[in-house]
Image (cartoon, rainbow, N blue to C red):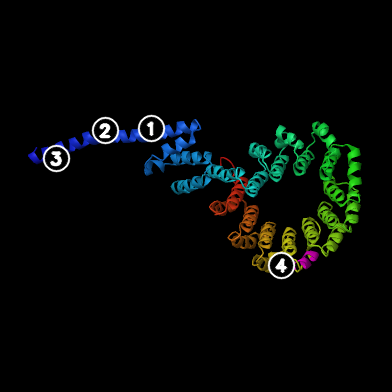
């Protein structure tokens, strides 16, 4: 071995001797940080767990399992925005969606608003939970029953009322003592969806509640549970001179499918009080007869727009009857919201999209956000044959400058597209508006299944 080679050999040995311990120390430190982060996460010390994860080098932190741990930690800290950023980076590594993680992030965008100081934002969150229709929502909805807003508590009660397990919840039953009539009414409507006779002792005293809508909701429950005197009481309310009593009773009766409902609806459709005519118009959606089409066609010419809207919606829901002709006329109604609801009714009736394409374009370009939102909701009624053109129209409304329009468009897109809407909904999680993000999260919860 030459002198030069000997020197090179010694240098290499020296470098290896110096570097190997350092490398071992570095890798040992990385492993230690990951283990420490996991241990802290398991102890629910999420802030410290995140601090340990932030000490990792970029290569280590980009590993899928490490990235997942960081996403979960951020979600526990109520930070779905950063969790989503990390999820986007995870998808780039995996080259596919991790739907289980996406589902958790979607829920995160909803839950973060349940603690928001703004009543409206909490309302958006509990609306999303209410529309989830999943038993996983029950603990969150039960928490909503303690909210400071009666409206929010009512949304939570409505969500629990839709689930068998929710209706059996002790906190749900306790909400029957709530001070807000809306909450008590929501609980009672939930009872009316079950056959649980154990609620009878809870409901009977409420027949004397000071709020008429609550008394009628209680009578509806008892009628549903075969208490015939309460059925008679409902019919009396439906013929009462008091418009509030009559309106509430009509809404309760149409769900009972009584043979006496149709004559009451016909009589009420000519009542001088608009709220009663509107309730009758809505009620006819549950009475699919040729006579219902005739009465609703007349109500499409009512002096008040809300009554005409109710008539249009009911005509759309009368499947088995061709209600398209009167609805065509409503496309030229003097009130733009009526036109929007007529579009939805026609799509519900299976009318060809070409018939409504012109009105959709016109109303989508109006200056009134409420009308644009109504059009977005109407497009959610498009059937399979109209799905593509409806989707194209919704893609424009999803980009609207007003959040309420984007919200309506997102819901309709999820409704007509199903799992195909996931990319759009995921993109909407990046929206600048809290309510839009929560709505997109709620829509994803209904579409993305666990462990998919």
Query: Is there CB contact under 8 Å for labels 3 and 4?
Result: no
Q: How far, Cα to Cα, is label 3 from label 2?
A: 21 Å
- Mark 2 / mark 1, whichever is N-terminal: 2
Examine the structure image and report whether residue 143 is included in the region drawn in magenta.
no
Task: Give the spatial CA distance, label 2 vs label 1.
Answer: 16 Å
Q: Which residue is mark 1?
A: 32
Give the numbered dot on residue 21.
2
Mark 4 near mark 2, Cβ–Cβ under 8 Å?
A: no
Q: Dot 4: what SS?
A: helix
What stretch of residues is rendered in magenta? 325-331
Give x and y (percent) for residue 413: 63, 55
Q: Element type at marker 1?
A: helix
Task: Determine whether label 3 and label 2 are within 8 Å by CB.
Answer: no
Are the residues tagged 3 and 1 within 8 Å (C-beta)? no
Q: Quadrant of residue 12?
A: top left
Res. 12 mark: none
**Of label 1 and label 4, which has the lower sequence position?**
1
Q: Main secondary structure of the magenta part?
A: helix
Camera-side mark, 3 or 1: 1
94 relative to 165 in the view: left or right: left
Q: What residue sits right under mark 4 in the picture?
A: 355
In the image, residue 309 lies at what x, y percent?
77, 60
The front one of 44 and 330 is 44
Gap in Å between the C-alphas at discs 3 and 1? 36 Å
Residue 319 seen in this snapshot: no
Vertical arrangement, residue 337 with respect to residue 286, above or below: below
- Tag 2–tag 1 contact (CB < 8 Å): no
> Which type of secondary structure does the marked residue at label 3 adopt?
helix
């Amino acid at each position: 071995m030459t002198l030069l080679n000997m020197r090179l050999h010694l240098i290499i040995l020296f470098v290896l001797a110096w570097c190997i311990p350092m490398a071992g120390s570095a890798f040992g430190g990385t492993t230690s940080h990951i283990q420490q982060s996991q241990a802290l996460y398991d102890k629910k010390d999420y802030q410290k767990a995140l601090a340990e994860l932030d000490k990792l080098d970029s290569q280590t932190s980009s590993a899928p399992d490490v990235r997942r741990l960081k996403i979960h930690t951020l979600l526990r800290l109520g930070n779905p925005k950063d969790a989503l950023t990390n999820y986007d980076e995870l998808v780039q590594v995996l080259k596919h969606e991790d739907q289980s993680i996406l589902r958790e992030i979607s829920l995160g965008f909803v839950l973060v608003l349940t603690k928001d100081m703004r009543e409206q934002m909490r309302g958006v969150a509990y609306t999303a939970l209410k529309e989830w229709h999943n038993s996983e929502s029950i603990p969150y909805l039960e928490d909503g029953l303690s909210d400071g807003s009666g409206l929010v508590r009512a949304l939570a009660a409505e969500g629990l009322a839709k689930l068998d397990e929710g209706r059996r919840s002790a906190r749900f039953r306790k909400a029957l003592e709530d001070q807000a009539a809306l909450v008590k009414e929501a609980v009672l409507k939930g009872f009316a969806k079950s056959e649980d006779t154990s609620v009878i002792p809870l409901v009977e005293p409420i027949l004397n509640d000071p709020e008429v809508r609550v008394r009628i909701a209680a009578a509806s429950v008892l009628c549903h549970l075969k208490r015939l005197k309460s059925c008679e009481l409902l019919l009396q309310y439906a013929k009462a001179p008091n418009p509030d009593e009559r309106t509430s009773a009509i809404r309760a009766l149409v769900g009972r499918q009584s043979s006496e409902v149709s004559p009451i609806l016909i009589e009420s459709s000519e009542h001088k009080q608009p709220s009663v005519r509107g309730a009758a118009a809505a009620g006819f959606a549950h009475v699919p007869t040729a006579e219902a089409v005739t009465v609703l066609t007349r109500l499409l010419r009512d002096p008040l727009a809300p009554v005409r809207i109710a008539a249009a919606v009911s005509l759309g829901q009368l499947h088995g009857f061709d209600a398209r002709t009167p609805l065509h006329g409503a496309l030229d109604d003097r009130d733009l919201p009526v036109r929007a609801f007529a579009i939805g009714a026609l799509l519900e009736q299976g009318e060809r999209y070409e018939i409504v394409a012109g009105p959709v374009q016109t109303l989508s370009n109006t200056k009134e956000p409420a009308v644009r939102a109504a059009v977005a909701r109407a497009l959610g009624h498009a059937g399979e044959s109209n799905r593509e053109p409806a989707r194209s129209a919704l893609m424009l409304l999803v980009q609207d400058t007003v959040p309420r329009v984007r919200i309506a468009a997102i819901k309709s897109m999820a409704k007509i597209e199903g799992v195909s809407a996931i990319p759009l909904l995921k993109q909407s999680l990046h929206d600048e508006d809290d309510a839009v993000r929560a709505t997109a999260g709620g829509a994803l919860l209904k579409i993305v299944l666990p462990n998919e």
